[in-house]
């Protein structure tokens, strides 16, 4: 049936992607658009699209300290950045607070909460939370500091400690606060792996 449909357009099926039931079709290049339109309207064809030739790219940010960030190429972040820099994603950083005036973080911060003191003071009790926030979502490609894995993401600081240690109940409360306030991801860089929730 496919051969009969294609013969009208002087085309032919050259191979098949069996897992998805798709056929790779060859037609005269000047007829590609017309054949796609015709196939798209055929009730026996689910979809038709061009088999595009794409170039491999690995985006490299202009942040001066990027060259010392060995971990980003290791996890193939450069390839991921070609597809997404996490724009529209909010990462809750459950930690010691985040330095709101940090030049690589200031434009990414959204309101957070201090669950220990039950107020909006998310200033850092220690530098740990600021470092974690920078690893996750420091603004990248801004000719400043470092790049991060998800430099287009927003950072929601949630302070769960005043001294570097956090209660599991405060972590649980912060996770719920983050979820209730629009966080997509919660990062907790504390040793909680041995706890049963």
Image (tube, rainbow, N blue to C red):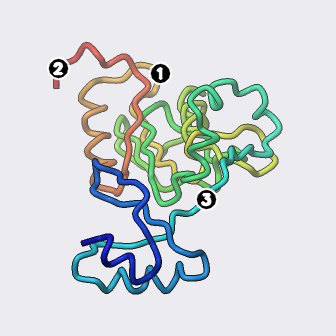
Which label number is shown at residue 52?
none
* Nearest to the observer: residue 128 or residue 9: 9
Q: Residue at x 65, y 30 (%)?
A: 73
Q: Alpha-carbon neighbours of circle 3 within 10 Å: few (<14), some, or many (≥20)?
A: few
Q: Image height check: is 40 above or below 154?
A: below
Mark in front: 2 vs 3:
3
Q: CA distance from mark 2 to mark 3?
A: 49 Å
Q: Quadrant of the N terminus?
A: bottom left
Q: Image height check: is 103 above or below 40?
A: above
Which label number is shown at residue 163?
1
Please give left or right for residue 48 compared with residue 58 in the image. left
Asked whether the residues under the numbered discs 2 and 1 touch, taking CB atoms below 8 Å apart as contact, a structural biologist would say no
Q: Position of residue 123 (x, y in %)?
A: 55, 40
Mark nearer the N terminus (3 vs 1): 3
Mark nearer the N terminus (2 vs 1): 1
Q: Image height check: is 43 above or below 65?
A: below
Asked whether the residues under the numbered discs 3 and 1 touch, taking CB atoms below 8 Å apart as contact, a structural biologist would say no
Find disc 2 in the rendering and name its residue: 196
* Nearest to the observer: residue 121 or residue 100: 100
Q: Residue at x 46, y 48 (%)?
A: 156
Q: CA distance from mark 2 to mark 1?
A: 24 Å
Q: CA distance from mark 3 to mark 1?
A: 54 Å
Find disc 3 in the rendering and name its residue: 53
- Helix, strand or loop status at disc 2: loop
């Amino acid at each position: 049936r496919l051969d009969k449909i294609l013969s009208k357009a002087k085309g032919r099926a050259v191979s098949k992607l069996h897992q998805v039931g798709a056929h790779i079709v060859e037609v005269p290049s000047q007829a590609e658009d017309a054949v796609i339109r015709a196939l798209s309207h055929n009730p026996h064809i689910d979809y038709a699209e061009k088999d595009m030739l794409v170039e491999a790219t690995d985006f490299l940010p202009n942040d001066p300290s990027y060259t010392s960030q060995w971990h980003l190429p290791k996890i193939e972040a450069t390839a991921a950045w070609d597809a997404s820099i996490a724009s529209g994603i909010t990462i809750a950083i459950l930690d010691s607070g985040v330095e709101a005036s940090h030049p690589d973080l200031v434009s990414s911060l959204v309101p957070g909460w201090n669950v220990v003191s039950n107020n909006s003071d998310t200033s850092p009790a220690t530098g740990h939370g600021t470092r974690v926030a920078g690893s996750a979502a420091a603004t990248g490609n801004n000719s400043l500091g470092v790049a991060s894995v998800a430099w287009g993401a927003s950072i929601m600081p949630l302070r769960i400690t005043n001294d570097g240690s956090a209660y599991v109940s405060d972590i649980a409360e912060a996770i719920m606060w983050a979820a209730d306030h629009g966080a997509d991801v919660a990062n907790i860089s504390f040793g909680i792996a041995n706890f049963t929730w």
